[in-house]
Amino acid sequence: MDPLPYVDEHAHALPVGAGPAFDAVAAEARALAERRLPRPFVRAWALRPASGFAVTELVRPVRVVLRGSHRFSTYELAFVIDETPEGVVVRARTSATFPRLRGTLYRLLVIGCRGHVLAVRGMLHSIARRAAG
């Protein structure tokens, strides 16, 4: 797979080991990849896969990668787990392309209006809750 252009990165420190952090990240990734979205929404947005995300890489205990695409973007969300003396830091790095004018407008709407930031931070908080038990 070709690398996509960098968009942003968010991080969250967790007071757990790499194993529990990886399990929490992998569970969050599977939940995203297995979600069922309404068929009309999937068709209208031309989502591939239909959930919006596919798990494309699992490297225990350091990396989980999701990829997907829709009418306005091809994107990747890579979670990287770095060990620290206090636990781990989970980083969520987004890369994406936004082709044509529609893609540019979509990027302005989602990335520029902080919707993406809120979604990624929500995922990181969900991962923290899963890792805490």
Image (spheres, helix red, strand yellow):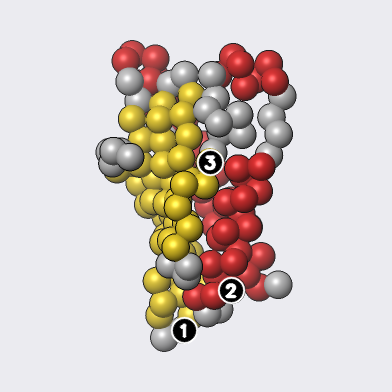
Q: What residue type is labelled 3?
A: Ala
Badge 2, how many Cα within 10 Å: few under 14, some, many 20+?
Answer: some
Quarter holding the N terminus is top left
Q: Which residue is drawn at 41% across and 41% down?
A: 76
- Residue carrying label 2: 20
Q: Can residue 113 be seen in this view?
A: no
Provide the secondary structure element on which disc 1 rests. loop
Instruction: Answer with left or right where residue 108 lies relative to residue 4.
Output: right
Residue 78 visible to an observer of this rendering: yes
In the image, which is nearer the foreground, mark 2 or mark 3?
3
Percent position of residue 20, x then y: 59, 73
Amino acid of disc 2: Pro
Residue on which disc 3 sits:
54
Looking at the picture, does residue 56 appear above or below residue 106? below
Q: How far apart are marks 1 and 2 (CA)?
A: 14 Å
Q: Which of marks 2 and 3 is nearer the N terminus?
A: 2
